[in-house]
Image: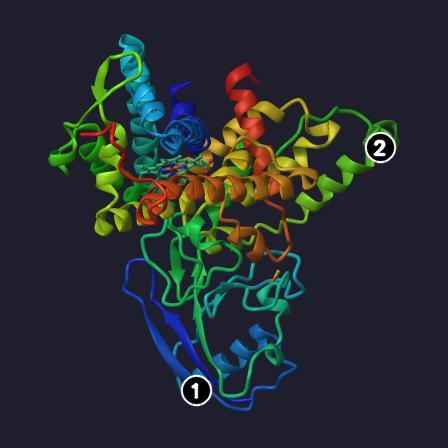
Amino acid sequence: MLGFLRSTILSKIVMTVSGAAIVGFLIAHLTGNLLIFGGPEKINAYGQGLRDLGLLLLFLRIGLVVTFVLHIVTSIYLADKNRTARPVSYTKKKSIQSTIASRTMFFSGLTILTFVVYHLLHFTYGIVQPEFYHGEYILHDGRTVPDIYSMMIHGFQNPFIVITYLLAVTFVCLHLSHAIGSAFQTLGINHTKYNGIIKKAGMGLATILWLGYMSIPFGIMAGVLKLTNGGH
Amino acid sequence: MKLVLKIWRQQNGNSEGKIVDYMLDDVSPDMSFLEMLDVLNEKLIAKNEEPVAFDHDCREGICGACSLIINGVPHGPEKATTTCQLHMRKFNDGEEIVIEPWRASAFPVIKDLVVDRSSFDRIIQKGGFITANTGNAQDGNTLPISKIDADASMDAAACIGCGACVAACKNGSASLFVAAKLSHLGLLPQGQPERGSRVLAMVMQMDEEGFGSCTNTYDCEAACPKEISVKNIARMNRDFFKASLFGV
Ligand code: HEM
Ligand code: FES
């Protein structure tokens, strides 16, 4: 049984299941973030709601970290095996029908990883822009909570930060444009009847995530989202 | 036609190889690619030089012996065609053609363009067989097989085991080859008794030989002279998963 666990096919299934879980997180995370368009009350109450989960939030975070680690460790194991499978490279080599996204999964993955670290330092730990991290907001129910709304607005008024996020989100979507179709193949789902739909759905989801995530920095740059009196 | 050939020359598995340039005149567009190499070798022999070693056998596209990465593509530019069936009319006068061997750690170079593909044989030995009744041969018509399965099995059986899939894959993965052999036997009633044990044994051997893993880029399918579909890889994944989880 241990042998099977080391096999490339089961490794790929680990990649797929962990990847799919992260896609689930991306969708949930986006849905939460989009509350910013509902104004400071909505997004700040949502943030507090998450914090109020307490122990459950801790477990969710641990689960997410474990998922990421599984995905990354497996990808390193496979990438190393794949590299050693061709010790001498070709003088001239053409790709015939593979896409750029499919050939650069490890690179796009590493870019995402770098970004995730940066993103946590930015919005979760407030190390990148500490000046915007300690704002407070008073909810309708009277509770004083961290002001996520103005933190995001301030953050994305800096064009360099917007460019970083633009690049990162683009790499996530590049990764996903291959990953979603690929995940079905790995799980053994490949049927002429459904392949068209799977491919379109994969591209569609990648596009929706890109538009969704980028709508926030773009909205802030365009002035659609701006500071309100509620924030300090 | 005149050609500039850039050919990988390597004395043996232990020596360093390099690309060597050869000018070849008077190539007929009606020659096959291998006949063109024969002409080159005649000239080399006449000059007392070592001819270029390359694999070939049937020269009619059915045995899987011929190979060669031609200008970066396994079996050259023509789709669904082996190197032996490729003709020089597919090239232009004066063209530069780079010719290299399959490159994979599981396919070590023996000499020049010849590689050792016995790793494929060892994979086949692990599961490329069925259980058959002894005694008189059974009447084939008594075994009902659906047309769909028979067709899919026959399509997979078209694999000639040349290794172009490995050569094309950026990971040097043998998934398309192994999957074709598994579908070939696993879709037929005769192949059922070993269906589970076969997929486990052949996949484990594939990994052991040092082939890479499949990242679903599908260059293998495009390079395959027999147009084996990557659907077979999905079937292999499915069968492997089932057999690992629920036993054989
Ligand atoms: C937003 C975060 C990420 C998501 C949603 C995600 C999702 C996925 C999914 C669904 C797959 C498909 C698995 C398959 O081909 O069957 C995949 C493949 C892959 N991921 Fe990620 N991933 C993410 C981050 C990363 C990171 C940080 C790395 C680190 C290097 C990485 C490296 C890879 C590689 C190399 C593959 C290809 C594996 C293969 O095809 O064999 N990914 N990813
Ligand atoms: S020599 Fe037999 S297939 Fe090309």
Residue type at tag 2: Gly
Residue type at tag 1: Met
Q: Is residue A135 above or below residue B211?
A: above
Q: Quadrant of the N terminus of chain A?
A: top left
Image disc number at residue B140: 2
Is label 2 in a helix, a strand or a loop?
Answer: helix
The residue that appears at 29% across and 28% down in the rendered structure is: A69
Residue B125 coordinates in the image, percent (x, y): 54, 36
Q: Is residue B197 left or right of residue A14?
A: right
The Cα–Cα distance between marks 2 and 1, rounded to whole angstroms, is 56 Å
Residue A117 coordinates in the image, percent (x, y): 22, 35
Nearest to viewer (mark 2 / mark 1): 1
Residue toward you, B240 or A35:
A35
Q: Please check whether the numbered discs 2 and 1 fall on a single chain.
A: yes
Residue A17 coordinates in the image, percent (x, y): 44, 26
The residue that appears at 57% across and 32% down in the rendered structure is: A188
Q: Report the chain holding disc 2.
A: B
Q: Is residue A22 above or below residue A153?
A: above
Residue toward you, A2 or B17:
A2
Q: Report the chain holding disc 1.
A: B
Type of colouring:
rainbow
Residue toward you, B65 or A147:
A147
Say which residue label 1 marks: B23
Is label 1 in a helix, a strand or a loop?
Answer: strand
> Which quarter of the figure has residue B154?
top right
